[in-house]
Image (cartoon, grey):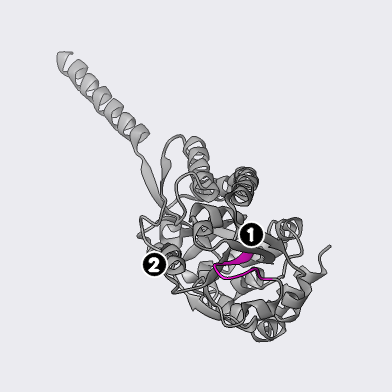
């Protein structure tokens, strides 16, 4: 009798230990972002992590490495494809040479407004573009807003394409952005974001292009005070997961990741809109010279860019469908 009781107690103790261990089993997903802590995309991925933690009963958590701690975007894309990084919030531009479909939302002036962009990317067209990532070792989960990119420089206000002639303008590492800026008469200079401030400060480049929050958070307004509202790009950014990491998840957990990423978009947009207003207010008060422009001459100058990048039948079809949307 004593032996049976002892065996039963030992068995119960082992079962309790295993159950406790299972309850505590936890996987931390590493996520990369080049933006500083507090930036809307960084906070949105943190929120995604909170939702995922809750949805999986604590089995999955997300640790966000902000401020390019894991490297610049080009480097982190490769790390994510190979599963070294699990998640990555990244600009669409660096994917342009790898995934043709990402060229479409990156095309200059493809979107007429933020509402037009959101309607497009939240619908079937956006889903098609998300699916195009998978053959490249990435599972694209959701699109995050990236505002409207405009030109800024240290020389003069930009009112017409001719005002850009001869300027050295930093662009993201994308052939499309290179050709866009060159089509306006400037000399496009690809460069990682972390190098832009010193390049502007020392005259290695005369200008760059980005949205209000980035112009503020990277403090480029200190060394390039002329900000011209061309709003030539409203391309969203994308939250991706390494396919190697994704394939390790159970079907239920894969669904949880997809659903949670989509849910985080709402929060991201709330944060973005607030941050955009805050940045614009700060920049206007800083002494930077802000000017509106007539966009039509800039749009007209993009004809050769569209001829080059929208000639593939699939890309051309996507462009036509976006332009036809009300």
State left or right for residue 21 relative to residue 131.
left
Give SS at disc 1: strand
Quadrant that contains the N terminus: top left
- Tell me the residue at 37%/64% (across/down): 79
> Earlier along the polypeptide chain: callout 2 or callout 1?
2
Q: Position of residue 27 (x, y in %)?
A: 37, 44
Does 193 appear above or below 87? below
Query: Foreground residue, 306 or 310?
Result: 306
The reply to whether residue 314 is in sight is no
- Tell me the residue at 61%/82% (across/down): 165
Q: Residues within 10 Å of mark 1 (few under 14, many from 20)?
A: some
Residue where numbered disc 1 is placed = 289
The label on residue 75 is: 2
Q: Position of residue 116 (x, y in %)?
A: 76, 60
- Tell me the residue at 44%/51% (across/down): 249
Does 18 appear above or below 134? above
Q: Quadrant of residue 99?
A: bottom right
Q: Quadrant of residue 62?
A: top left
Q: Quadrant of residue 323?
A: bottom right
Q: Position of residue 143 (x, y in %)?
A: 60, 57
Give SS at disc 2: helix
Q: Total of numbered circles in the picture?
A: 2
Query: Foreground residue, 98 or 278?
Result: 278
The label on residue 258 is: none
Task: Tell which residue pokes out farthest to the right in this image.
Answer: 326
Task: State yes or no: residue 151 in magenta.
Answer: yes
Residue range (magenta):
149-158
Task: State yes or no: residue 146 in magenta.
Answer: no
């Amino acid at each position: 009798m004593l032996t049976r009781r002892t065996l039963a107690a030992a068995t119960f103790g082992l079962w309790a230990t295993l159950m406790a261990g299972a309850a505590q089993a936890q996987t931390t997903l590493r996520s990369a972002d080049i933006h500083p802590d507090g930036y809307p995309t960084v906070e949105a991925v943190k929120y995604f992590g909170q939702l995922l933690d809750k949805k999986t009963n604590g089995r999955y958590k997300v640790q966000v490495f902000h401020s390019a701690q894991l490297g610049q975007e080009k480097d982190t894309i490769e790390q994510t494809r190979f599963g070294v990084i699990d998640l990555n919030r990244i600009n669409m531009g660096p994917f342009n040479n790898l995934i043709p479909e990402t060229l479409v939302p990156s095309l200059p002036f493809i979107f007429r407004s933020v509402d037009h962009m959101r309607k497009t990317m939240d619908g079937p067209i956006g889903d098609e573009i998300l699916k195009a990532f998978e053959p490249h070792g990435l599972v694209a989960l959701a699109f995050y807003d990236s505002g409207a990119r405009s030109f800024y420089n240290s020389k003069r206000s930009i009112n017409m394409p001719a005002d850009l002639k001869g300027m050295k303008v930093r662009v993201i590492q994308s052939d499309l952005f290179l050709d866009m800026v060159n089509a306006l008469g400037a000399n496009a200079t690809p460069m990682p974001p972390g190098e832009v401030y010193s390049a502007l400060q020392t005259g290695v480049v005369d200008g760059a292009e980005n949205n209000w929050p980035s112009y503020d958070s990277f403090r480029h307004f200190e060394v390039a005070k002329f900000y011209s509202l061309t709003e030539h790009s409203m391309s969203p950014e994308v939250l991706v997961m390494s396919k190697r990491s994704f394939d390790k998840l159970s079907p239920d957990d894969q669904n949880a990741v997809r659903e949670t990423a989509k849910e985080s978009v709402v929060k991201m947009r709330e944060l973005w809109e607030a941050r955009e207003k805050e940045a614009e207010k700060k920049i206007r008060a800083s002494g930077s010279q802000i000017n509106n422009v007539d966009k039509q001459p800039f749009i007209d100058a993009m004809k050769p860019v569209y001829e080059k990048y929208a000639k593939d039948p699939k890309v051309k079809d996507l462009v036509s469908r976006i332009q036809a949307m009300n």
